[in-house]
Image (cartoon, rainbow, N blue to C red):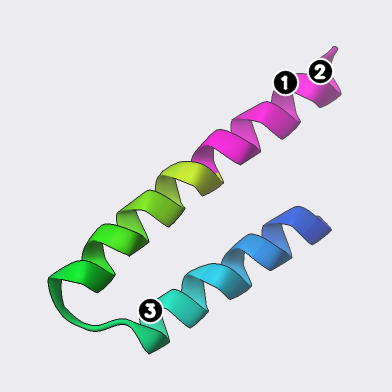
Amino acid sequence: MSTYEAISLMILFSMLISTQGDGGFVLLMIVVKIYLWGCSEVTRNYSK
């Protein structure tokens, strides 16, 4: 696991713990999308 992935997971878990209700769900979806985008960016950079 890379440092980027570890940081992303920590942010994800902290959001899950600290937010409740619909607002928390929306934040979670945003974080997941950023995480997936970041992973695809990293993969693209490594494959060059």
Task: Identify the amino acid type marked 3.
Answer: Leu
Q: Is residue 6 left or right of residue 15?
A: right
**How busy is the neighbourhood of tag 3: few (under 14 within 10 Å), some, or many (20 plus)?**
some
- Comparing 22 with 4, the one in front is 22
Residue marked by disc 1: 44
In the drawing, what numbered circle is on residue 47?
A: 2
Task: Identify the amino acid type marked 1.
Answer: Arg
**Which callout, 3 or 2, points at the residue further toward the start of the chain?**
3
Q: Is residue 18 left or right of residue 21?
A: right
For image coordinates 80% across by 22% down, the residue present is 45
Quadrant of the rendering where the C terminus is positioned = top right
Report helix, strand or loop for mark 3. helix
Residue 17 position, x and y percent, is: 40, 87
For image coordinates 61% across by 74% down, the residue present is 10
Residues at marks 1 and 2 touching, judged by CB atoms closer than 8 Å: yes
Residue 25 position, x and y percent, is: 23, 66
Residue 7 position, x and y percent, is: 69, 66
